[in-house]
Amino acid sequence: MNITVMGSGNGGLAVAYHWASKAHRVNLYAVPGHDDNIGAVAAAGGVRAHGDIEGFAPVAYSGTDVTRAMEDTETVFVVAPAFATADFARLAAPYLRAGMVVAVCPGSCVGSLVFKEAAGLDVHDESVIIGETNTLPYASRADGQGAVHFFHSFSTGLSAAAAPRSGNARLLEVIRLIYPYTAEAATVFQTTLQNGNPVIHPAVTLLNTGLIERTGGDFNFYEDGVTESVGRLMAGVDRERMAIADALGVQILSEPELGVAQGYMTEANYTTGYSAAPGFRGIKAPDRIATRYLTEDLAYTMVFWTDLAARLGVATPVMDALIQIASVVLGRDLIAKAPRTLASVQLDGLSTEQLLKL
């Protein structure tokens, strides 16, 4: 199969390597200015893997020419932060053809719907199968020299859904070529709500703000940053997240349960489950407050969760409080400037019943 991976960061190199290592033809694309790894991959002719996965896999094209990157492609993986999904969609739009599959991996926050809106496709359009995963199935880091280190590659805990869900069968047929353990999610709202990062990152960051600013992040985010009080705040966010899922009629795991299933953690609780987790050991805190832990996990996903919750009549006082505190800490109104809402992904005019059928 001909694969195009859009995004050449940690996750992009991991996805490109994994598919190429299984004899698929892979093109790797990066936006000019965000192409730190592209030159090294092009010079080497592929991606080298270390750690949990070892080897070298050839990449057919690696560069910043989107026309070449999309040539003859059958499946596109968009592997990038939430704020980049729309940009990649606009770049890919002229090359989309009926029957192609696009997977936003991870979806982060209804990434499939963001892609469709930015690409000029109606939310119910079925000509191109556009879906998303709940997470990236690796913990990986690129070294800037054309190699990627796999710290962890899990074999359960990945789910995927298309928008609309009528495309689920085809999406899963493709994704399961490399990730055979992928579970079918009932809807893209399920993949979005099964994203655990907004449960963890904002709570730990905001309750360790002083330490981050004093030390420049010179401490272990999980081992040192998660205490009983921090755990209670994480649990409060998780309860509200699961209440939203209940209102939609979809089932999701609690964040620590998912962490155990994916192999990151050995204890399904909100304190030592994280601070003693083998998969999180040694991960440093961010060196500043304005990082993706707040500007993406909170400003995009948690704000979207509260917008969805309001439509469903679910109270979210803990999430609302975190958003307000983060707005003060970051110095900007995250609600007034929300980048991701029901309206922004063509859903504002749908009834609750129509949302449930998407």
Image (tube, rainbow, N blue to C red):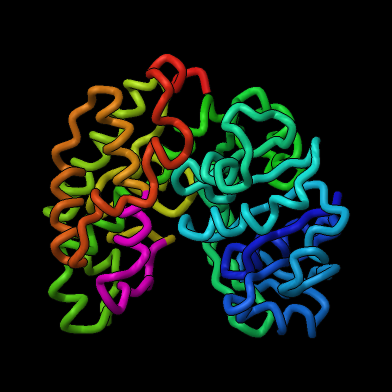
135 horizontally vs 25: left or right: left
The residue that appears at 43% across and 60% down in the rendered structure is: 279
Q: Is residue 281 magenta?
A: yes
* Magenta-tinted stretch: 280-300
Q: Position of residue 67 (x, y in %)?
A: 80, 64
Q: Nearer the viewer, residue 257 or 309?
A: 309
Q: Is residue 253 above or below residue 63?
A: above
Image quarter for residue 294?
bottom left
Q: Position of residue 324 (x, y in %)?
A: 15, 52
Q: Is residue 179 above or below residue 347?
A: below
The residue that appears at 57% across and 31% down in the rendered structure is: 123
170 horizontally vs 263: left or right: right
Q: Residue furthest top?
A: 353
The residue that appears at 31% across and 29% down in the rendered structure is: 244
Q: Is residue 293 magenta?
A: yes
How many numbered badges does the structure rendering display? 0
